[in-house]
Image: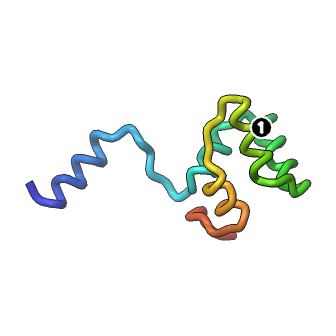
Amino acid sequence: MGLKDRLAEIQTTTSRVYNEYCAFQNMLLALNPEDKKAVDDAFARNIPTSLIIAALRKEGIKTSSDSMRLHRAGRCKCPKK
């Protein structure tokens, strides 16, 4: 089995969705509109990443502070505007 075959196999056997967004943006897209607005408002009010992460985790939402920091700084893999 060659590399081409192995990569094709991964694409058909994995449930993970590969897209153009970072992990943090994918988490945001999965939130309900009210929660997404709350996170957006927290960003606008410059609430520290560590406090936003703590609030998300208390609600059972898993995300990493590193992915949030990169996303907030515009250094993640999300398309740039």
Decide which of 46, 20 is in the foreground and name it. 46
Q: Amino acid at mark 1?
A: Ala
Image quadrant holding the N terminus, namely bottom left
Q: Residue at x 57, y 56 (%)?
A: 22
Q: Dot 1 corresponds to which residue?
A: 55
Q: Judge left or right: residue 3 versus residue 17.
A: left
* Residue 77, percent from left and from top: 56, 64
Q: Residue at x 68, y 68 (%)?
A: 74
Q: Label 1 neighbourhood size at 10 Å, few (<14), some (14-19), many (20+)?
A: few
Work out whether 60 lies above or below 70. Answer: above
How is the structure coloured here? rainbow
Image quadrant holding the C terminus, namely bottom right
* Residue 32, percent from left and from top: 72, 33
Q: Residue furthest left?
A: 1
Q: Residue at x 69, y 60 (%)?
A: 69
Q: Quadrant of residue 14?
A: top left
Q: Residue at x 74, y 40 (%)?
A: 54
Under tag 1, what secondary structure?
Answer: helix
Decide which of 66, 37 is in the foreground and name it. 66
* Residue 11, percent from left and from top: 30, 48
Work out whether 70 lies above or below 8. Answer: below
* Residue 35, percent from left and from top: 78, 36
Q: Residue furthest right?
A: 45
Instruction: Say how many tags the image has.
Output: 1
